[in-house]
């Protein structure tokens, strides 16, 4: 049976997409089945600013940061993430001879999510409720579609959007999208590439890298994690609980980010 | 055997996407297999203008108008067409219970095209050559991918981009993309919806509608056709020569645009 690896490419600065794409060819040649999931937060922010719709980031009472997504923001997000990042990633891979196929979670109901139309936030120390938000929590993955594509020799490249039970387009978190896909395919490895070497005990001190974590230590890890790293730890937990074999959080800024991570560099969670 | 219909949705003003999507559900319920192809020229122009990259339209010596597409224009095109139009169309269809799946021609090498890196144009009466153009002529359709998706119960929604033989992303004409797909699938019908009632003998006089054309009359029709209609006539010819059963050029502005066209309104070419 072929090994299945789900790779989340960070949208953060310093993560080198072309190095990742190069490395993808090595894994495919070694007979692996790959699904790539990407972000695009920075691009969406830039496009929003240049078209007069700067983003608004909000923080939940439990400390998660997310993009407030009204319908106009969702359209900007779709353009930047589905339109630009996804297309250019597919192009890069095609140029390397990889038969990549871009999808968002709306396509063929790849990712079905429950819409959170009202979200609780904390702003200037006060709790508020925001409505008209088009974000969601993924509840279902169309595993059959992914399996069909993988069997056909395609490498799926997934943009972090989902479809609600009513058919609405939603913005979803890319780390957790990758995690639910890893769980649904019972992937051998979920690899979360980011702009740090892994989970750091004392962020941003890179020498404080935690190299191994057991599942039982994830609760503690969640307390240590700062900012967006919290979602990666949550994603790791969801992936492992759902049936993925192993999660690696690793550096996306190095020369061969995937090979490097699979060689054991980063935070390995199993 | 199920009937296969390829529908090109015009990007032109007045064409009602929601009426088309409603009508799509009727055809699917009647057991048809459908592939939708859309444009997005107007959106790409609007996005280019709002981000400081207004489009440049050029005319070939034989009278065809096209968008000059350097790499920046291509990225704008990808955002507007792959990102916005395609995603919102898939969303509309999902809301109606249609399991739509958006693709561009890059995805899985759906549409492989020969890049025209240098194009001849006429400007102020003078002939010029423009380089660095990312447009192409489709040479190959991944019929197997479309067939797999159709068999799986998905309705493919195709954005007019293609991949070159070197893996580059290219902007292609949506009418001719629909025509090559119709040919490759030996579709029963290619339906080109537009903002006029069909091919007009005296454009823009709508009472001069040509209701029927035989294949042998296509050369004459090409002379009559004005502006973008020339590409539709060329597309009709390519589709019929490639194995499609019938082409209908019809009005996309009416209440039930697809049913109306299939009932015989428009220009029927066979």
Image (spheres, coloured by chain):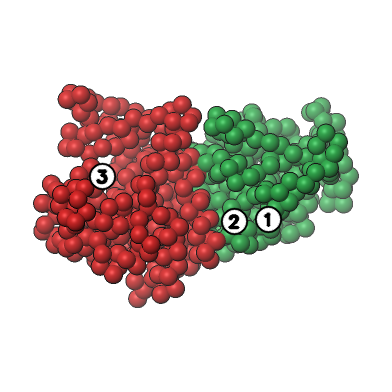
Chain colours: A green, B red
Q: Residue at x 57, y 31 (%)?
A: A52
Element under label 1? strand
Residue position for label 3:
B228
Side of A199 relative to B13 (left or right): right
Element under label 2? loop
Pick the residue in front: A15 or A61.
Answer: A61
The answer to which image quadrant residue A253 occupies is top right
Q: Position of residue B75 (x, y in %)?
A: 45, 35
User: For the residues marked 1 and 2, what is the alpha-carbon distance in whole angstroms?
Assistant: 8 Å
Considering the image in quadrants, where does the C terminus of chain B appear? bottom left
Residue B183 visible in this rendered orientation of the protein? no
Q: Chain of mark 2?
A: A
User: For the residues marked 3 and 1, what is the alpha-carbon distance in whole angstroms?
Assistant: 41 Å
* Circles 1 and 2 in contact, beta carbons < 8 Å: yes
Residue position for label 2:
A168
Side of B132 relative to B29 (left or right): left
Q: Residue at x 51, y 39 (%)?
A: A84
Pick the residue in front: B238 or A35.
Answer: B238
Q: Residue at x 38, y 41 (%)?
A: B41
Q: Position of residue A199 (x, y in %)?
A: 79, 37
Considering the image in quadrants, where does the N terminus of chain B appear? bottom left
> Dot 3: within a 10 Å radius of its alpha carbon, few (fewer than 14), some, or many (20 or more) residues?
some
Element under label 3? loop
Q: Position of residue B109 (x, y in %)?
A: 41, 49
Residue position for label 1:
A115
> Dot 1: within a 10 Å radius of its alpha carbon, few (fewer than 14), some, or many (20 or more) residues?
many
Q: Which mark is residue A50?
A: none
């Amino acid at each position: 049976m072929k090994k299945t690896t789900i790779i989340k490419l960070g949208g953060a600065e310093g993560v080198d997409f072309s190095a990742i794409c190069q490395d993808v060819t090595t894994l495919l040649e070694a007979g692996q089945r790959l699904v790539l999931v990407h972000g695009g937060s920075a691009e969406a922010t830039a496009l929003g600013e240049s078209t007069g719709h700067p983003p608004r980031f909000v923080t939940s009472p439990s400390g998660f940061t997310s993009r407030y997504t009204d319908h106009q923001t969702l359209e900007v997000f779709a353009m930047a993430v589905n339109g630009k990042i996804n297309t250019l990633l597919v192009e890069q891979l095609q140029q390397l001879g990889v038969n990549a196929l871009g999808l968002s979670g709306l396509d063929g109901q790849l990712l079905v999510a429950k819409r959170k139309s009202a979200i609780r936030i904390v702003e200037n120390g006060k709790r508020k409720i925001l409505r008209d938000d088009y974000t969601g929590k993924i509840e279902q993955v169309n595993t059959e579609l992914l399996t069909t594509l993988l069997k056909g020799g395609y490498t799926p490249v997934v943009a972090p959007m989902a479809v609600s039970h009513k058919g609405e387009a939603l913005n979803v978190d890319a780390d957790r999208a990758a995690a639910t896909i890893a769980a649904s395919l019972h992937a051998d490895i979920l690899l979360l590439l980011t702009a740090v070497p892994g989970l750091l005990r004392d962020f941003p001190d890179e020498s404080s890298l935690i190299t191994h974590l057991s599942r039982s230590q994830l609760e503690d890890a969640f307390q240590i994690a700062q900012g967006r790293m919290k979602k990666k730890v949550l994603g790791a937990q969801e992936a492992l609980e759902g049936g993925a074999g192993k999660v690696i959080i690793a550096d996306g800024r190095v020369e061969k980010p995937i090979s490097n991570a699979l060689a054991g560099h980063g935070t390995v969670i199993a």
